[in-house]
Amino acid sequence: MVSVKAEQAHFGVYPLLLATVAKVNPLQFFKGAWPAIQLAFVSRSSVGTMPVTEKVTERLGVPKEYATFAVPFGATTKMDGCAAIYPALAAIFIAQIFDVQLGIQDYLLIAFVSVVGSAATAGLTGATVMLTLTLSTLGLPLEGVGLLMAIDPILDMMRTATNVAGQVVAPLIVASRENILDRDKYNAVTSSPVDESHLALAGA
């Protein structure tokens, strides 16, 4: 439950970053990015969602030349949902279940493993590999993974949606800061499916 709340908090941070750093309307972002976020939620795979993520990033005004670099890069390095937030919270939960006291050095180690892991985790379904890595690094019982396996698919839906949303937000912010964002295109985006919008653009 705490993991889900942490993922939901990201959906509060992203609009804040878009409004204050990129200087764009966050509602337009969710309109344009919704097909990718939706697919990420049901597929539980950042890599599987990547083609749609690229398309929505482009239709939000990010130049194609940059989007085709940033989105695949983000799909392999921006795994904060699966490799940072979830393993950290799960490790603390498992430590409490097995009555293991964690010290300040353990929390620092969790933070370090989470940061490194978020950049090294494959964008595939599930986060068991990162969780077992975090537990073994801390010397916690690996049996704790079994406690979370039953609800992991549900958690993974939210984790992957968080990852993919961030993979669209990051190129938007960079494009805005570098003055290469097409703001007219961003402001005109609709919530139509990606294929329909691309057909409309092609026919224009």
Image (cartoon, helix red, strand yellow):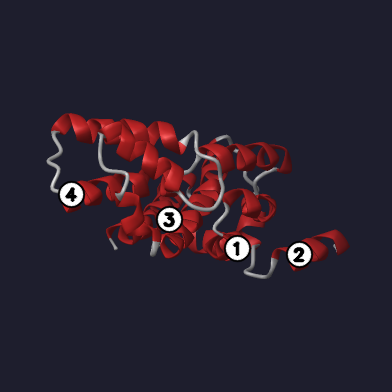
Closer to the eye: label 3 or 1: 1
Q: Tell me the crowding category of disc 2: few under 14, some 14 to 19, or many 20 or more residues within 10 angstroms, Cα based.
A: few
Kindly identify the residue that appears in the image at 27 percent across and 43 percent down.
141
Q: Earlier in the sequence, mark 4 or mark 3?
A: 3
Closer to the eye: label 1 or 2: 1
Nearest the eye: 49 or 102:
102
SS class, disc 3: helix
Q: Earlier in the sequence, mark 3 or mark 2?
A: 3
Res 183 seen here: yes
Alpha carbons under labels 3 and 2: distance apart? 25 Å
Residue 15, labelled with which disc? 3
Q: In the rendering, at what x and y percent does residue 168 appear?
A: 56, 49
Q: Amino acid at mark 2?
A: Asp
Alpha carbons under labels 1 and 2: distance apart? 14 Å
Q: In this figure, which residue is indicated by the disc labeled 4? A: 98
Viewed as shown, does residue 60 lie left or right of 135?
Answer: right
Q: In the rendering, at what x and y percent does residue 162 appear?
A: 46, 54
The image quarter containing residue 146 is bottom left
Q: In this figure, which residue is indicated by the disc labeled 2? A: 195
Q: Quadrant of the C terminus?
A: bottom right
Kindly identify the residue that appears in the image at 49 percent across and 50 percent down.
163
Q: Amino acid at mark 4?
A: Phe
Residue 39, labelled with which disc? 1
Q: Amino acid at mark 3?
A: Pro
